[in-house]
Image (spheres, rainbow, N blue to C red):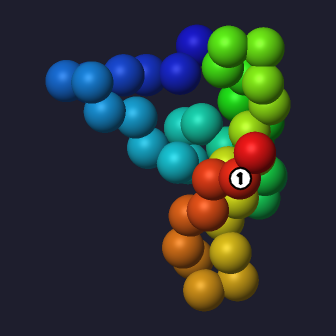
Amino acid sequence: MVPVIENTVTTLALMDESQVLTVRHDNASYQLRITSKNKLILTK
């Protein structure tokens, strides 16, 4: 279970050691990635 406090979740809690997380929304898949410069990118 991912801890959510005041509608906020950390990327560490979501992704742990992974650099990519797949999110399903309305039958579509999106990838949330942490870049080498520690930025977040969400792609379909």
Q: Name the residue at 74% across, 39% down.
A: 30
Residue 20 located left or right of residue 12 = right
Badge 1 local density, few (<14 within 10 Å), some, or many (20+)? few
Out of 7 and 12, give the one closest to the viewer. Answer: 7
Q: Name the residue at 68% across, 75% down.
A: 35
Which residue carries the number 1 mark? 43
Q: What's under tag 1, amino acid-wise?
A: Thr
Out of 29 and 34, give the one closest to the viewer. Answer: 29
Q: Quadrant of the C terminus?
A: top right
Q: x, y (%) of residue 28?
A: 78, 24
Q: Secondary structure at mark 1?
A: strand
Q: Name the residue at 60% across, 36% down.
A: 14
The answer to whether any part of residue 16 appears in the image is: no
Q: x, y (%) of residue 1?
A: 58, 13
Seen from this angle, which residue lies furthest left? 6
The answer to whether any part of residue 27 appears in the image is: yes
Residue 4 located left or right of residue 28 = left
